[in-house]
Every structure is written in structure tokens, then in C-alpha cells.
Image: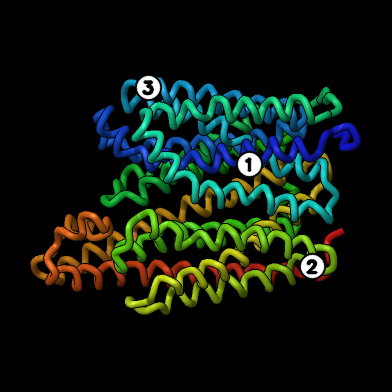
Amino acid sequence: MSSSKTNVPLVTGAIFIATFMSAIEGTIVSTAMPTIVGDLSGVALMNWVFSIFLLTNAMATPIYGKLSDMFGRKRLFLFGLAIFIIGSTLSGMSNSMTELIIWRAVQGIGAGSIMPISFTIIADIYPFEKRAKVMGFNGSAWGIASIVAPLLGGFIVDQMSWHWIFFINIPVGLLAMAGIWIFLKETPRKSTQTLDVLGSIWLSVALLALMFGFQVLGDAKINWLSLSMSLLISVVSFSGFIRQEGRVENPIIPLQLFKIRTFVTQNLVAALISGFLMGFEVYLPTWTQGLLGLPASLAGFAITPSSLMWIVGSFIAGKLLLNRSPKQIINFSLTFILIGGLAMALAPQATPFWCFFVIAAICGTGFGITITTTTVTVQNQVPKEDVGVATSLNTLARTLGQTLMISVFGIIMNVNMASGVAARKGTNLGMMNRLINPQTAKTLGGHLLKPLRQILYSGLHWIFIVALGLVILSYLINQLDRRNKPET
């Protein structure tokens, strides 16, 4: 890629727009989902609107990474954006939940290109010493999306229709495509290598089965047959994938990457901290709504400081990467997350709202340093021709960590609520659902609020204890990296 001809600021802006579009998608759909369910009458299939997007996104990510190394970033990024726009258009035109789920799958296939190729393009057009700062700026799209999405989603549903939460992606996506098409100058690549199609199939099946198993694992009533079959298919497919990759000339994922100690430890840390992040982002607002009785609009701001400090953490990572080793930086960054995790695990039920702003700011700083450092480091550990694959594997590791842990946290909460209501006469799970929504919590008698909140607090307490264990495990894994020299 020729950075001298590329308009770097405008390409960076186009990448930011694409990242923001992808980031806002999940939250804005969540905001509109009650209206969608009411219109399409598909409450039983509601979870699959989200799950299928994650499944196809995870499946597509490593394939995009390999193809971008073979044929160039520009054409793969444009292709992924085009698929995302097509999926968004057809999702908005859906007349049933089944149709919506099918087109959300298409949307997920397109979205699988956005994060890994965005980071890869940044690695191509920016020198090492500036890369972390730019990734911090690009990552701020997620923080902005977390604030804007609920407000924008509510406005669109109230003033227009739910169909427009998908149609709005068309002009935004086309703007991002135009920026990349016009301003990103890339030397055309004519790879003489052929894509490892069989390896891609093995990997896709393995990831689909694994992600499906995670979704089943998170259900209130686990279908053990489906879970067992998913895990079996995943194990068999991963075994076939490893055998295939060991004997082909151009593997979809070069297995020798896993012989690089720093590459492996950084990806494992990214996966574990991404799992912690899900507990933080999902259950901290649950605390402020269910235990403090705050409205959803205010409760969501409990995690806003983390988004702002994430950017600060990315800038700190950029400075540290110049003269500290990845192992040293991660040890430093995990200290912030450890402090935040301890505070959440030990927080009493009556913790005031302002305390969560402090916790979020501390955690956000750690998130920014950790995620930025792991991304930049894995890119710098591999040959230039494998940067796309390395970036996609880092993205995949984070996705798998998030998906697995949101299922585990769901199990913890379900078990605690079930045992809690069984031990307290006059309570049931329906009441717990009403408690978490401050609007319906008002309908519960005052004598029920205290025991129900104790049940909810117990579940949240154990979730944060398990999340804290992820941070400790991350620290231990990081000690396996023996490299102490700064990256160059």
C-alpha cells in the first residue's frame, strides 16, 4: 500500500464512519426490538436476530483476513461494506422474523470485514509509533455509539418506523465506501496462490458450531443434546481444519503463528479481557437499574466514562509501546482492570451511583491500554504478508471471549435467580424480570423489593467475582511471555 499517495486523514475518517456504523448496529437494533417483535410477531425467535449476526460475523472474520493479505485490503473492505449494505437493506424490507434472521446473517457476513480490515489498513498507512493513537481514535466510535444509539434508535422508531434502523446504514455505508474507493491508494495485488477452500469450510463449520454452542449455553433452559452435538461438531471440524492447514501450501491460518509465544499470549489476554468487558458493559447497567431503580436512559451512562477513558488509554499505550515490552505494558494495564474488577466484586448493595463513574473510568483506562497493545503487538509479531490474518485472529479471539463469557454470565444469573426465588416464598422469576425494568418495578409491592433486590445482588456479585477471575487469569497468562524488549 502506498501511504504517500493515500489521503491518510480522509481514509482514517472513512474507516471511522464504517466502524461507527458497525458499532451502533447492535445497540440500535436492541432499542427497536420490542417494536419489531410487536410488528412481526416473533418473540420466540427474537434472540436469533442477534445470535445469527454474531455467528456469521465470527465465521467470516478469519477468511477476510486471509483474503486481504492475498488480494489487498481495499477490494475486500469494499466488498464487505457492500454485503453489509445489502444485508441492511433486505433486513429493513423483512416481513417476518424468519426473513429478518436470514438477512441479519448476510449483514453479519459483511460486518466480519469491518473491524479486522480497518485495523489492518491502519497498520498499513501509519508507522508503528502513531498506530496506537489512531486505533484509540477509531475505537472511540464504540464509545460514541453507546451514547448515541439508544437516543437515535428511540427517535427513529417513534418518528419513522423500525425499518429505518436498517435503512440508515445505506447512506452511511455508501459514504464510507466512497472514502475508501477514492482516497485509499493501493498497489493491485495479483496473488498466484489459491485460497484454501477446504480449510475455510472446516474453519467456518467449526466456528459456527462453537458459537451456536455458546448461544445454547446461555439459554435459560439449556438443550443439552444441542449443546453436545455443537461441541462434537466443533471438535471434529477443528481437528479437520488443523490437519488441512498442516499439509497445504497456502493455509487460511498459518499454524506457525501459534509458535510465537507473544502472539499467543497477547491473543489470549485479549479474549479474556473482552470476556470481562461483557460482564462490565451488560451487568453494570443492570445493577444501576435493578438495584438503584434508575431509568434506562440514566443507567446506561454508568459505563460512559469507560468509553472516554478508553481513548486516553489508547494514547498511553502508544507512548508505552515505544519503550516498554508488551509484557510490561499488559502487567501495567491489567492493574487498572484489576482495581475496577475488585471494586465491582466487593461493592455493597447500597453503592451510590457516582461510584460507578469512578469504576468505569478506571476500567476504561485499562481496556484502552490492553486492547490497543494486544492489537498492535500481534500485528508486529508476524511477517507483513500475514498482518491481515494476525489482525483477524485478534478480532476473532475477542469475539469468542465475549460470546463465551456472556453465556457463562447468563448461566450464573439464571442459577442465582432460580435458587433465590425458590428460597423466598412469594417470589418468582416473573417478578425478577419486572424488577430489572424500573418502570415495571414500581408495580411490585414494597415488601417484595428488598428480597428481590437481594436475589439480584447475589447474582451480580457472583458474575463480578467470575469476571475478576478472568483478570487474574490474564495476568498469569501474560507472565508466560518471556520477552522483555520493546516492540520495534
The residue labelled by disc 3 is 94
Residue type for callout 2: Ser
Graded by Cα atoms within 10 Å as few (under 14), some (14 to 19) or many (20 or more), the crowding at tag 2 reads: many
Graded by Cα atoms within 10 Å as few (under 14), some (14 to 19) or many (20 or more), the crowding at tag 3 reads: some
Q: Earlier in the sequence, mark 3 or mark 2?
A: 3
Mark pair 3, 1: CA separation: 26 Å
| SS for callout 3 | loop
Q: Position of residue 359 (x, y in %)?
A: 51, 71
The circle on residue 340 is: none
The circle on residue 325 is: 2
Query: Marks 1 and 3: in contact by CB < 8 Å?
Result: no
| SS for callout 1 | helix
Q: Residue furthest front?
A: 159
Query: Marks 1 and 2: in contact by CB < 8 Å?
Result: no
Mark pair 2, 1: CA separation: 25 Å
Residue type for callout 3: Ser
Graded by Cα atoms within 10 Å as few (under 14), some (14 to 19) or many (20 or more), the crowding at tag 1 reads: many
Q: Residue furthest right?
A: 4
Q: Position of residue 380 (x, y in %)?
A: 80, 52
Q: Earlier in the sequence, mark 2 or mark 1?
A: 1
Against 293, residue 123 (above or below) is above
At x 49%, y 77%, the residue is: 342
* Image position of 456 (left or right of 123): left
The residue labelled by disc 1 is 115
Residue type for callout 1: Met
Foreground residue, 426 or 203?
426
